[in-house]
Every structure is written in C-alpha cells, then in structure tokens.
Amino acid sequence: MNKEHIFIIEDETDIRDVVEYNLSREGYSVDSFSDGEAGLLAIQKQTPDLVLLDLMLPGLDGIEICRQLKQHHKTSSIPIIMITAKSEESDVVLGLGMGADDYVSKPFSPRELVARVGAVLRRPQPKGEGTNPDRIERHGLVIDSQRHEVLLEDKLISLTATEFKLLQFLASHPGRVFDRDHLLSRVLGEDVVVLERNIDVHVRSIRKKLDHPDDLIETVRGVGYRFKY
Ligand code: CA
C-alpha cells in the first residue's frame, strides 16, 4: 500500500475528481485544490510528496506556482508533474526548464497518470543540477567519469567531450525531460563554441555511436530529450 501524499491543483472539477479517485485507489492520499493560491498555501504548510499542477488556473497560474516552489529551499525538491492542454506546449518547455519533473497532456488516461506518478516518485532524488556522479550504470550502459569512459555492453564507446557531458547529464536524470535550451546552457555551459551549439546534432551522433536497439535517448516531440531507462 502506498502512503505517499499527493496534492493536485486543478480548477476543472471533472479532472480533479478522476485523478483523485484513481490515485486514492492506488493507495495514495490525495488533497485537491481548485486554485493556485490555496494550493500554494497548503504546500507551504504541509510538504506533499508530489504535486500535480494544472498550468491554466484562475489567478496564480501553474508556471508561477512552479517558479515559486522551485525558488524556495523548503519546497524546491518536491516533484512536480504538470497537467497541460495541447496548446500549451511552450509553457511545458518553460515549466520543464524551471525544474518540473514531467507533464501529462489532456486528455490523458488515468492509467497513464498513475504510471507517471509512480515513475516520478520512484526516481532517485536528484543531487542537484550539475552533479556528476562518478559512475552511472543503466541498461547496459556504464559511464565512468573518473576514467572519462563510456561502455555499452562492455564495449568501449568513443565520444567527444561534448557528447560525453550530454550523455552523462541525461543518464543521471533518467526519465526526466530536458528542453534544448536547458541542455545547452546548463549542461554544456556558455563556453561551448558556436559550432557545437546544436543539441540535435550531438544527440544524433551519440545515438549513432551507441547503436543501441532500444534507443536510450528518447526524443520528446516539441520539447526535448530524455534518457529512457
Ligand atoms: Ca485549468
């Protein structure tokens, strides 16, 4: 039985009810809020394990709530899954750039939502941006930072310094989507030369070198990339 405490901030009663019903059935305890101010106030009083956050809310919108939560030390590590409409793709990019963990687009199936919630809660707590674990092992891939080596099924893969950084960052945040701007500015840094500023080219090259049947780096259309496993 799960005991995690989830807050949902959503102004549409139907969606709120469906989400609440399905998550409760999975054993989560759920509190619902129909507007941003009430939700934010509640989070500041009692830290939930995860927040499901609608983007279009009356008053304080989802992006603003996300910004405020990520700004404060006490609330910055609470995982956030955004609930969005198809037309809000640019807001998704903004939210992910601010540190939201994932998003679901309306209409979504309850099953999909429950799976996403479970996946985000099971993720290892991020050690913060820019931390480079010494060794990452995932799905047959080994990234050894000290040796600056990448092995796939024990085979040595030769990557450029930029490709190495990118793969290491994505693999150390499995399942989390990052947009291109984030990868460029926060991962590769401002010092990369102009020629290297095309994330898509680097990802394509990494994929080609890994030549993995399961395509470890997934393209999230309209948003960016995520490490799948
Ligand atoms: Ca709404």
Image (spheres, rainbow, N blue to C red):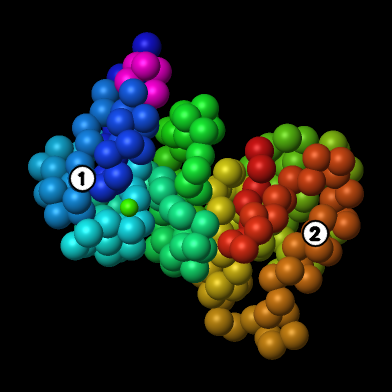
Give the amino acid at mark 2: Ile
Nearer to the camera, 99 or 56:
56
Question: Label 1, on which residue?
Answer: 34
Specify start and end residues of the magenta stretch as a single range. Answer: 22-28
Residue 166 location, x and y as percent? 66, 62
Dot 2 or dot 1: first in sequence order is 1
Q: Secondary structure at mark 2?
A: helix
Question: Label 2, on which residue?
Answer: 206
Decide if residue 102 is in sight here: no
Q: Secondary structure at mark 1?
A: loop
Residue that appears at 75% across and 62% down: 203
Nearer to the camera, 132 or 111:
111
Decide if residue 111 is in sight here: yes
Residue that appears at 81% across and 63% down: 204
**Quadrant position of the C terminus in the picture:** top right
Q: Residues within 10 Å of mark 2 (few under 14, many from 20)?
A: many
Q: Residues within 10 Å of mark 1 (few under 14, many from 20)?
A: some
Queried on whether the Cβ of the residue with tag 2 lies below 8 angstroms from ligand 1, the answer reads: no
Residue that appears at 46% across and 55% down: 85
Q: Residue furthest top?
A: 1
Residue 27 in magenta stretch = yes
Instruction: Using the image, determine if residue 171 lies above or below residue 110.
Output: below
Count of number-bearing discs: 2
Quadrant housing residue 183 = bottom right
Residue 68 location, x and y as percent? 24, 61
Give the amino acid at mark 1: Ser
